[in-house]
Image (cartoon, coloured by chain):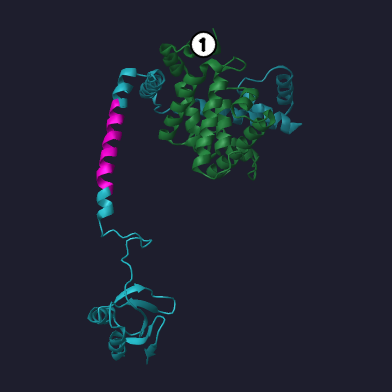
């Protein structure tokens, strides 16, 4: 019971207690010295809180800030929603048609040029020159340098038409005298490991 | 005309977009509300921010106020909610904790000390050491002189919790003062 009274004391001190609760507290205070001390303590605390320095509040600056924020909100609310401007959309319509025509003309001009350009080779091999003459399957020694292989192939007029396969086999097209080419290739043992004519004889180390 | 009547009538005008009424409403509550927010945050800049947010909310929501509570209760409730929200974002401190240890010192000597003339500075110091939830309740009870029922609405908790918080605040004050005054 005493704790209940103690819990009501702050509200007795601030004068907000009424009715039955007020009567109960008054009666308890009249009978209990320690409660009166508690009450005095709470009154001194309340005095201190009441007398605390209010410090500098935002005051007029705060009000100005609010008014500015409210004005901003009002502007957002009252900004006119763009209406459907037929005159302006007509201009844009003409501009878009003109742009489409230009794109069409440009495409019609550029695409044929593209098709004539031999530097652009499709990955599918559509523009790869057809293989003419015998084809040799060649493997190179692992230590062979690309530069030396290139010189050898140019020397025998051979070109790589396929490969390398997973086993390192390259297909070489040789326009003429395949036997002589095979001999020349096999002569470079520091570069060529094996040579085999597709559908024919083979040679190697 | 009571303060609540004045505030209610201003709020009605604010709800119709009356900026003069809004300025009057601001002037009526600004200092007290700022003090209340600052008592929880202890940061002038943040307190000013929340004050601004609170009054902006009043401007936007004035028409939703139905007069079922006092205007000040509604207003302080908004401020309390915004303050707690800001504190939650800033810290991991639990905002509704009432369970701090109590080491009450009820000795007559300590009580006598508390009532001496030099207590003022100590009380000021100890008020600052209170937990935010207790300081808020103390502020509402002793600065605003609000009944516990209204404080409960503002801080959105049961009436008994308000009484308990106030009780704990008082105990913490006594403990702090005893330590400072060597009681």
Dot 1 crowding, Cα within 10 Å, few <14, some 14–19, many 20+? some
Left or right, residue A21 beside residue A107 = right
Which quadrant would the N terminus of chain B be assigned to in this image? top right
Residue A116, picture quadrant:
bottom left
Question: What residue is shown at x 42% (from left), y 81% (from top)?
Answer: A199
Q: Residue B109 at x, y = what percent? A: 61, 40
Does the magenta run of residues contain A107?
yes
In the rendered image, which residue does mark 1 sit on?
B12
Seen from the viewer's position, the closer of residues A183 and B54 is A183
Question: What residue is shown at x 45% (from left), y 22% (from top)?
Answer: B30
Q: Residue A115 at x, y = what percent? A: 28, 53
Seen from the viewer's position, the closer of residues A46 and A191 is A191
Chain the render paints green: B
User: Which residues lie in the magenta part?
Assistant: A94-111
Which quadrant would the C terminus of chain B be assigned to in this image? top right
Left or right, residue A181 beside residue B131 = left
Q: Is residue B47 visible?
A: yes
Residue B160, picture quadrant:
top right
Q: Is residue B57 above or below residue B40?
A: above
Seen from the viewer's position, the closer of residues A117 and A145 is A117
Question: What residue is shown at x 62% (from left), y 29% (from top)?
Answer: B156
Q: Residue furthest top?
A: B1
Seen from the viewer's position, the closer of residues B107 and B133 is B133
Q: Residue A153 at x, y = what percent? A: 27, 79
Q: Give the dominant element type of the magenta stretch: helix, strand or loop.
A: helix
Does the magenta run of residues contain A169?
no
Which type of secondary structure does the marked residue at label 1 adopt?
helix
Chain A: its colour in the image is cyan
Q: Is residue B119 visible?
A: no
Q: Residue A73 at x, y = what percent? A: 40, 22
Residue B153, picture quadrant:
top right
Chain under numbered label 1: B
């Amino acid at each position: 019971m005493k704790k209940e009274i103690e819990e009501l004391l702050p509200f007795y001190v601030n004068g907000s207690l009424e009715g039955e609760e007020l009567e109960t507290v008054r009666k308890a205070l009249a009978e209990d010295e320690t409660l009166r001390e508690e009450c005095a303590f709470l009154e001194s605390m309340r005095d201190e809180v009441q007398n605390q320095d209010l410090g500098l509040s935002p005051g007029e600056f705060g009000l100005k800030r609010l008014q500015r924020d409210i004005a901003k909100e009002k502007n957002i609310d009252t900004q006119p929603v763009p209406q459907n401007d037929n005159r302006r959309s007509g201009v844009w319509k003409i501009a878009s048609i003109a742009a489409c025509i230009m794109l069409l003309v440009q495409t019609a001009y550029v695409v044929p040029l593209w098709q004539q350009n031999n530097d652009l080779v499709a990955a599918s091999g559509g523009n790869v020159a057809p293989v003419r003459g015998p084809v040799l399957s060649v493997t190179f020694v692992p230590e062979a340098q690309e530069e030396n292989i290139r010189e050898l192939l140019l020397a025998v007029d051979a070109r790589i038409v396929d490969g390398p396969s997973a086993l390192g086999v390259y297909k070489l097209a040789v326009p003429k005298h395949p036997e002589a080419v095979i001999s020349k290739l096999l002569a470079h043992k520091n570069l060529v490991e094996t040579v085999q004519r597709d559908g024919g004889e083979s040679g190697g180390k | 005309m009571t303060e609540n009547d004045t505030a209610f009538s201003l709020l009605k005008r604010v709800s119709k977009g009356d900026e003069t009424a809004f300025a009057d409403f601001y002037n009526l509550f600004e200092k007290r509300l700022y003090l209340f927010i600052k008592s929880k945050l202890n940061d002038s800049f943040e307190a000013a921010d929340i004050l601004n947010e609170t009054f902006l909310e009043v401007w936007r929501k004035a028409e939703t106020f139905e007069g079922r509570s006092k205007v000040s209760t509604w207003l302080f409730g908004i401020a309390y909610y915004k303050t707690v929200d800001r504190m939650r974002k800033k810290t991991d401190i639990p905002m509704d904790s009432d369970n701090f240890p109590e080491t009450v010192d009820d000795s007559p000597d300590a009580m006598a000390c508390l009532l001496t003339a030099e207590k003022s500075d100590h009380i000021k110091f100890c008020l600052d050491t209170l937990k935010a939830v207790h300081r808020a309740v103390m502020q509402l009870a002793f600065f605003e002189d609000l009944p516990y029922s209204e404080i409960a609405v503002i801080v959105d908790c049961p009436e008994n919790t308000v009484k308990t918080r106030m009780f704990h605040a008082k105990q913490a004050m006594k403990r702090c003062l005893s330590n400072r005054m060597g009681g």
